[in-house]
Amino acid sequence: MSNRDSNVFLIGPMGSGKTAVGKQLARLLRAPFRDSDAEIESKTGVDISYIFSREGEAGFRQREREAIEELTRECPIVLATGGGAILLPENRAALHERGFVVYLKTSIDQQVERVRQGRNRPLLHDVDPLVKLTELMDIRAPLYEGLADFTIATDGRKVHVVADAILAAFKAAQPLA
């Protein structure tokens, strides 16, 4: 069995539910759950906002690239990536080659609602969240869609319903033994 047959990588914008769905899916698959942003914070000892403030987005993206390169080599794993992880071609290649990629698609209205209560989001600092999230989706949506093996809308859906649907799609995609 290859990594591609035992790993699930969740992509999508901030607020799409990657962490919540990933934890539930990991339980269903009996696989470890990892979050690339949490791994970066754990390794550096500081939060993502601090890295952005010190190193800018480019510095953060470099750290994210290293984390994704490492995490996608683990097997089995359910990995929640940061919303911008798909921006770098190296990340897209690692995700595509080493796992089943699931795009958690969500409306911008739902994102705004979810990120309002969420942890600090450096790209939303001192900007109108609706405007910024719209700009980000204009750039990122084609990348999410192009990379995904499976796409599921998360608006108005309970975490376990989304996780169950991903599990079914993942199992259906497995090669016959």
Image (cartoon, helix red, strand yellow):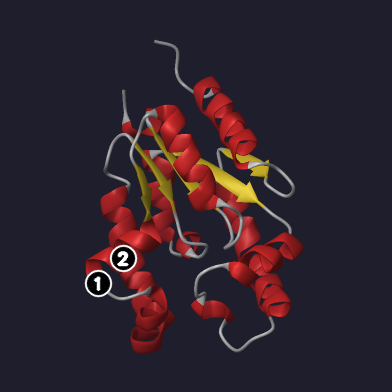
Q: Residue 54: x percent and y percent?
A: 34, 88
Mark 1 neighbour class, 10 Å CA radius: few under 14, some 14 to 19, many 20 or more? few
Residue pictured at 31% horizontal, 68% vertical? 41
Residue type at mark 1 is: Thr
From the viewer's perspective, is residue 23 above or below residue 3? below
Comparing 148 with 93, the one in front is 148
Quadrant of the frame with the C terminus: top left
Quadrant of the frame with the N terminus: top left
Disc 1 secondary structure class: helix
From the viewer's perspective, is residue 106 above or below residue 108? above
Q: Residue 13: x percent and y percent?
A: 59, 60
Mark 2 neighbour class, 10 Å CA radius: few under 14, some 14 to 19, many 20 or more? many
Residue pictured at 52% horizontal, 62% vertical? 83
Residue highlighted by disc 2: 40
In this image, 76 relative to 155: left or right? left
Residue pictured at 58% horizontal, 53% vertical? 144
In this image, 93 relative to 116: left or right? left
Q: Residue 142: x percent and y percent?
A: 64, 57
Seen as rendered, the residue at the extreme front is: 117
- Which of the 4 quarters of the picture holds residue 36? bottom left
From the viewer's perspective, is residue 4 above or below residue 123? above
Q: Residue 91: x percent and y percent?
A: 40, 57
Q: CA distance from mark 1 to mark 2?
A: 6 Å
In this image, 148 relative to 76: left or right? right
Q: Determine whether label 1 and label 2 are within 8 Å by CB.
A: yes
Residue type at mark 2 is: Ile
Residue pictured at 23% horizontal, 66% vertical? 43
From the viewer's perspective, is residue 132 above or below residue 16? below
Residue highlighted by disc 1: 44
Disc 2 secondary structure class: helix
Comparing 93 with 64, the one in front is 64
